[in-house]
Every structure is written in structure tokens, then in C-alpha cells.
């Protein structure tokens, strides 16, 4: 039995599976922002945004710091290098398969063309 103990991947992909959380990462890529500002931009409640930020924090993609009465958010220190490498392996696998399929199709087209000329 094969088992993958990649809870980090689970947290990362779960965090990235939601459009709002991806949007939060995009916003924080431009500048640090408070949870209140993020909630306003996404037209959601403060509680809803806190939940999204919490998921991103658990994945290590966002950090928060309380400054006075405001909780400020910024991109986390963790990068997505391992996740990108994992995706890249499958991208290359599928690219190789499609290249092989293209080759088969070209061979068939050539045979069909050759067969058409021999009549």
C-alpha cells in the first residue's frame, strides 16, 4: 500500500482550492493589508475573512500580526517550491504523452496521404 504523508501539500492545495483565498494572496502580493480591508474588498464579513486568512495561515502562506486594534496580514515566508515541483512532474508527464499522441497522429496522416497517392 502506498501512502503519502504530505500534510503540507494537503494544507497548501486546500488553501489554494478557494477563489477567495487565491484572491487574498493576490492582494497581499501587492501590499500588506488588514483583515478588515480584505473583507471590504471581497464584500464579506470580518468573520468570513478571518476564516479564509486562518486557512492560509495554517498552510503557511500568510502571516498575521496584531498592531494595535488591527490584525495586519502579509504573505508568509513559505514558498510553494515543492508544490510547483510536484505539479511540474505531472505537467511533463502529460506533455510527453501528448507529444507521443501527436507523433502517432502525424504517422497516420502520412500513411493516409501516401495511401491516397498510390491509388
Image (spheres, grey):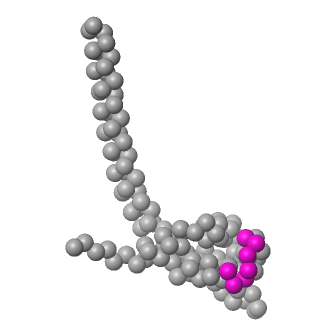
Q: Which residues are magenta?
A: 42-48
Q: Quadrant of residue 113?
A: top left
Quadrant assignment for the N terminus: bottom left
Q: x, y percentage for residue 4?
A: 32, 74
As drawn, the residue found furthest toward the left would be 1
**Where 80 falls versus 98 (above or below)?**
below
Q: Is residue 98 left or right of residue 42?
A: left
Residue at far top of view: 119
**What residue appears at the point 30 percent right and 9 percent down from the top-left corner?**
117
Q: Is residue 70 depicted above or below 21 in this figure?
A: below
Residue 66 shows in the view: yes
The quarter of the rendered structure image containing the C terminus is top left
Residue sitting at x 34%, y 51%:
93
The residue depicted at 31 percent of the width and 39 percent of the height is 100
Residue 34: in magenta span? no
Q: Residue lying furthest front in this view?
A: 119
Q: Position of residue 70 (x, y in %)?
A: 75, 87
Percent coordinates x, y for residue 53 in the rendering: 62, 79
> For this rendering, which residue is in front, 71 or 23?
23
Amino acid at each position: 500500500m502506498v501512502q503519502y504523508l504530505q500534510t503540507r501539500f494537503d494544507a497548501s492545495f486546500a488553501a489554494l482550492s478557494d477563489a477567495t483565498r487565491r484572491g487574498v494572496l493576490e492582494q497581499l502580493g501587492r501590499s500588506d493589508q488588514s483583515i478588515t480591508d480584505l473583507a471590504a474588498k471581497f464584500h464579506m464579513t470580518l468573520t468570513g475573512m478571518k476564516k479564509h486568512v486562518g486557512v492560509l495561515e495554517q498552510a503557511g502562506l500568510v502571516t498575521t500580526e496584531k498592531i494595535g486594534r488591527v490584525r495586519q496580514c502579509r504573505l508568509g515566508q513559505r514558498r510553494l517550491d515543492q508544490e510547483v515541483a510536484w505539479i511540474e512532474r505531472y505537467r511533463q508527464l502529460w506533455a510527453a504523452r501528448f507529444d507521443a499522441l501527436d507523433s502517432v497522429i502525424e504517422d497516420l496522416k502520412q500513411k493516409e496521404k501516401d495511401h491516397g497517392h498510390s491509388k
